[in-house]
Structure formats: C-alpha cells, structure tokens
Amino acid sequence: MKNRMGVEQGTSSGSSEADDAQRTAAASFMSYASPLVEEAVSQMAELGEKAEVDAEILHRLRVALRRLRALLWAYRPMLEPQHYESHQALFKQLADAAGSTRDWDIAIELIDRTQKNGATISGDLLNARAKALELSRIALACDSAGAALRNALADANAAQLAHDNSVSLQEFADTRMTAAQHVFRKRMRKARRAKHPDDASLHEMRKAAKKVRYLREFFGPPLSTIKLKESKRLKRIHERLGALNDVVASETLLDANRQLFSAPDSLRDAMRALRKERKRCMRSAAELL
C-alpha cells in the first residue's frame, strides 16, 4: 500500500482512514517523515553518481527537504526548541545547497521563455550552473548528508515520542492545520492591506500557503472536512506566487553575478525581460488577494 506521499508502506490490508485517525500523532511521525528522508537520500545519491544532473533531480530533492521542514513545523509542539531549531537549520542548509544549482536552472528556463534572443546569454548561464553544481555535489555528498538526515529523523522521533504519546492524530492534525491556516490568513491580510503588494509580503504569504498545502497532503484523511475546502484556491496561490518568486529570485541571481557574463548588452536585455515578467506575475498574484 502507498502512503499519502506515494511511497510504499507495509500496512495491513485491513487498515483504514478511520484507523489512521485513531492512531496517536507521535506514532504517526515516522510514517510521514521516513519516505521524505529516503526520497532526499535517493536524489542526493543520483546527484553524486550522474555526470549530467537534470533539473528534476534537484527539484525533487528540494521539495522533499521543504516538506520535511513543514512536517517538522507541524510536530514542533512535541520537540524541544533547541532540537527543533537545529533540525530545521540542517534541512534548510541542505535545501539551500540544492537550491543554489536549482536557481540557475530556473533562471535558464525563464530566459529561454521570456527573451527571444536568449541564446547569447545561455552559455554564460550554463557555465555558472556547472560551477554551482560542483558546490552542490560537495555539500550534498550522499554518505555524510544522508547520515545527518537519518540521525536528525531518529532524534526527532525519539524526542516527540518521549514528549507525548497520547494525542490522537485526528486532534493533532486539526490543531496544527488550524495554526498553519491562521498564519496564512494573517499574512494574506497583510499583503491585501498594502497599497502595492511587494515581493517580500507576497513571499511570506506564499511560504504560509505552501505550509498549509503540505500539511493537507500529510494529514488529508484525518483532517475534519471543513479544513479541506480551500485546497484548490491554495493550489492557485501556490502556483502564482511560486511563479513570481522564481522571477524575483532569477533577477536577484543575475544581478548579483553580472561579472560572470561576457555580453553586457544581452544581460541587460535579459534583466529587462525578467522585469516585464515580474510585473505580469505580480498582477496575476494580486488578483488572488
């Protein structure tokens, strides 16, 4: 049987969503976390083994690590603050290591899509991406990074089991989803009140929406149905704000690495195309407020 993340789990044929809801939150932690850690380790292994690393490997790795961070946030009440902070720092460090190369992939895709004469700059972008990939390989060496992830997982599991082993998954999922939705609505109100929503406020809103969406994917069946009504709207918000974030990140990346490019005129044209795309994405995102 596959779990909610699409990974095989060894559950009995008689299990049901009702049975899942009656399990304790503590006993459920590993069923959510283990597949994510193994997915991350698998992608790190591919990163180290393949001579040519495609964008999808880095994307899957970063998503797995982001989901781990969201899951750890959900279980935060069952962890000591110092453990929570250290594990989050590890997950973020690894996600940033994957992201340093993934950001170049996104910039290349955007330049190809938004600029007719992107060929002039693509060589410089690919060279920069290759250098970033070497650094990512070092930071994400599978043996050391994988061991760190598995150790963090074991530590977090032991800590939350020791903290409380009686709260039902149903109660826990409802409580943490309510907390995530509260943060999301608060950040949406802040973005909505702004005369001109800025990149920073929309980025914070996007992160909060992403957390709600990830928690829904983890806890879907045990959640009360009232918590699931906004799923389609959350998906639109996630996609539109994600598109905006990609453009903003690409602008920042190119601007910070101007010295790497051999054709200043082409770089200027690329930045102009990205600014135009950012305005389009901003208008699209503002429609959701």
Image (cartoon, rainbow, N blue to C red):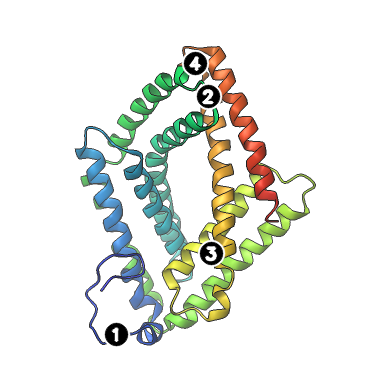
Is the C-beta separation of discs 1 and 3 under 8 Å? no
Report which residue position mark 3 lands on: 212
Which amino acid, by three-letter code, is at mark 4? Answer: Gln
Report which residue position mark 2 lands on: 116
Rendering coords of residue 228 (x, y %): 54, 73
The crowding category of the residue bearing disc 2, from other C-alpha atoms within 10 Å (few below 14, some 14 to 19, many at least 20), is few
Q: In the rendered view, would you say 187 is above or below 2? A: above
Report which residue position mark 4 lands on: 259
Look at the image and tell me whether residue 117 can be seen.
Answer: yes
Is the C-beta separation of discs 1 and 2 under 8 Å? no
> Would you say 140 lies left or right of 236 here?
left
Q: In the rendered view, would you say 153 is above or below 265? A: below
At a point 37% along the width and 76% down the height, the residue shown is: 26
Report which residue position mark 1 lands on: 15
Question: Mark 4 or mark 3, which is nearer the start of the sequence?
Answer: 3
Is the C-beta separation of discs 3 and 4 under 8 Å? no
Question: Mark 3 or mark 1, which is nearer the start of the sequence?
Answer: 1
Residue furthest toward the front?
116
Q: What's the distance in space between the residues labelled 1 and 3, CA to CA?
A: 26 Å
Front-most of 104 and 65? Answer: 104
Q: Nearer the viewer, mark 4 or mark 2?
A: 2
